[in-house]
Image: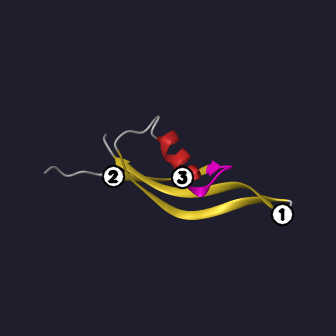
Amino acid sequence: MSDTVYKIIELVGTSEVSWEDAAKNAVETASKSLHDLRIAEISKLDMKVDNGKVTAYRARVNLSFKYTS
């Protein structure tokens, strides 16, 4: 087995529907330009509130991918 290096980046996904959709949006958007995605870890969930109403869900995602030089 060869040695492998992974890079971890932090993303914030948003959705007007749910935290799950927010996390999914972050990963799917990243997958358009990053390859060999491995693990997505949710590190924080929060909501945007306007006038006492929840208007958006946000998910902070740590995403790892295989690093190649």
Q: Would you name the residue on which mark 2 appears?
A: 6
Residue neighbourhood size for the residue with mark 2, other residues' Cα within 10 Å, grouped as few (<14), some (14–19), many (≥20): some
Q: Would you name the residue on which mark 1 appears?
A: 52
Which is more N-terminal, label 2 or label 3? 2
Q: Nearer the viewer, residue 55 or 29?
A: 55
Residue neighbourhood size for the residue with mark 1, other residues' Cα within 10 Å, grouped as few (<14), some (14–19), many (≥20): few
Q: Is residue 4 left or right of residue 2?
A: right
Which is more N-terminal, label 3 or label 1? 3
Residue appearing at x 60%, y 63% in the figure: 45
Which is more N-terminal, label 2 or label 1? 2
- Type of amino acid under label 3: Ala
Is residue 21 inside the magenta stretch? Answer: no
- Type of amino acid under label 1: Gly
- Type of amino acid under label 2: Tyr
Figure quadrant of the C terminus: top left
Image spot of residue 50 (x, y percent)? 82, 58
Q: Is residue 48 left or right of residue 51?
A: left
Residue appearing at x 52%, y 40% in the figure: 29
Span highlighted in magenta in the image = 14-20
Q: Nearer the viewer, residue 49 or 11?
A: 49
Image spot of residue 43 (x, y percent)? 52, 64
Which of the 4 image quarters holds residue 67? top left
Q: Which mark is residue 26?
A: none
Residue 44 vertical placement versus 15 (above, below):
below
Q: Residue furthest right?
A: 51
